[in-house]
Structures are given as structure tokens and as C-alpha cells.
Amino acid sequence: MANQDPESRGAKSRGSSYPPTYYSPSYFVESRERMWTSWLVPMIVVANVCMFIVIMYVNNCPKNNLGYQGSCVAKFLGRLSFQPLKENPLFGPSSSTLEKMGALEWNKVVHGHQQWRLVSCIWLHAGVIHLLANMLSLVFIGIRLEQQFGFVRVGLIYLLSGLGGSVLSSLFIQHSISVGASGALFGLLGAMLSELLTNWTIYSNKAAALLTLIIIIAINLAVGILPHVDNFAHIGGFLTGFLLGFLLLLRPQFGWLERQNLPADARAKSKYTIYQYIFWLVAIALLIVGFTVGLVMLFRGENANDHCSWCHYLSCVPTSKWNCNN
């Protein structure tokens, strides 16, 4: 148990098996809105790196590795050295260490009353490769959003999307552990999509921007059907962030921003459009219903696969090259 492989045990790393994909938001129309200094996203990156160092210190491969699957990797790092590659090919700790440090595990959340794991798991990573992929994604996606909308809104989207991903993951994956910030990262992608839709009138090259973003999201979600990648965390995070974007990332109309330059007898536009208000109301209703239903089902110990016989294909599609038994 102490030296089980996160892969062989069926642990789900959120998004560690593929390179991050981005798009350049060159279609943004400049306005007189304030540009924020990004500090929260860099702090999140530093926190994740520090947490990984702590995990490797606790893991202490030279002391705890029994040698059944080989010797520790990078022994010159001392107790920070990695588990054997046969055990963890992502250059990281054992699954038992991840579990001890707060990995998402359905049984402990529901029956062990350790609900904090729904949040703690988004600060853990299965290995150096997993950590680098997620942190590079966060830097490219998060800094731009924080500069435009500020640390409060981006921080809320990041944390709530991570929670949404953890809830959906726990409902469908109940026999393995899950770690990683990919649910929160997909939440930022979802928020970028809803921000484009709700602020549609202020952008140029709208169709190209929308198509580019949809393709990027589709590719990243499609890669999630590979084994050992927790695509339910991706989907849950994306849906949460998509809805939060309608609530938190509204931009005023240009006509309202330029109202001080209008003639005295001219009628200024309203701050927001009707469809922005409609999106806002629908999004807040869906968020409340979604989190309420999801948390009630989770703490009642229900398995969402019993209510959706085909949903498991959203996280893993069996082929001749691999199976999805776990």
C-alpha cells in the first residue's frame, strides 16, 4: 500500500498526460477599463510548487521505498527523490503519500467526514510533469484574466471551479484517488468562453475568436478520455467556470463607458444589455441547483454512474490499446 503506483492503483491525475493548449486573445478590444497587476496567479503557482516540495519531503523515498519496483529516481535529492518510474512515471510521490496529504478519495469524503479533501486535492500534483503542465497552463490563462478582471473574481472562479470539478469527480469516480488543479484550470477556460459570449458586442473578429476557443476546449476535453486522466474533474470545473463567467466577468457596453463624451441631450446606453442580465439570472440559478444536487448526492453516498449508464465514457473510452476497468 505504501508504495503503490498512482497509475496502477487507478489514481486519476487531472490533466498531466498532455501538453497545455492556449489561444492568444488578440481580438480583445481595448477600452478605458482598469488593468490590474497580476499577483494572485503567481502566488498560486508558488503555493503549488511549495506544496509539491512538502509532499516529496513527507514521501521520503529513500526511507519508505521497499524496492519492489526499482530504486528511487534522482537519489542526489535525498529524501526529495522520486518514486521508481515503474511506480510513478510522472516523477513524483507514491499514491499513499498523496492520499495522506489530502488527495480526493470518495470513501474518506463521504464516510470519513473529510470534506476538506474536495478543496485540498486541487493543491496536490502526482509528479513534476503533472505540476509543470498545470502551472504553465495557469500562467498563460490566469495572468491575462487577472489583469483584466482582478484577483477577486479570478480567485473565486479558480477555487469554485476546482470545487465543482471535485464534486463531479467524486460522484463518478469512487474507487481511486484524484489530484491536480486541472478542474480549476478548465474553470478558467470555461469562464473565458462565457466572457466572450456575454460581452459579445465589444469584440472584433468574434466568430474567429469563438471558433478558436471552442476548438481548444474540445481538444483538451477529448484528451481527457485517455485512461488515468480525471475528465470528470475537467468537465465539472469547466461547467462551473462557464457559469461563473456569466456572473463575474460582465463588461459594460461601450456606449455606457463613453457617456461622459456624449452631448447633454443625448441618451446614454444602459450599462449592460438585456441578454447579459438573462445570462446572469440563468447562470446563478444553474449554479445553485447544480451544487445543491451534487453535494446532496455526494453526501448521501450515491454513485452517479447508477443514474447515467454511459457517462463513464466521458472519462475513459476503451480501445484495443487500453481498457477502463478502473
Image (tube, helix red, strand yellow):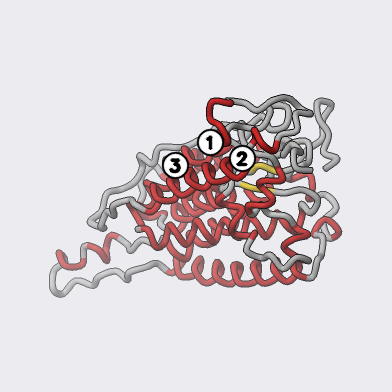
Badge 2 vs badge 3, beta-carbon distance below 8 Å: no
Residue with the mark numbered 1? 133
Residue 181 at x, y percent in the picture: 56, 48
**Relative horizontal placement of residue 280, taking residue 37 as reference (left or right):** right
284 lies above or below 172: below
Give the residue type that dot 2 points to: Gly
Choose top left, top right, bottom left or bottom right for residue 13: top right
**Residue 209's disc number:** 3
The three-letter code of the residue at mark 3 reads Ala
Does residue 298 lie above or below 320 as drawn?
below
Compare marks 2 and 1 and give the one earlier in the sequence.
Answer: 2
In three-dimensional space, the C-alpha distance between marks 3 and 1, rounded to whole angstroms, equals 24 Å
Assign a secondary structure to mark 3. Answer: helix
Relative to 143, is 84 on the left or the right? Answer: right
Determine the residue positioned at 38% across, 55% down.
201
The residue depicted at 81 percent of the width and 64 percent of the height is 302
Image quadrant assignment for residue 288: bottom right
Tell which circle, 3 or 1, labels the residue nearer the N-terminal end. 1
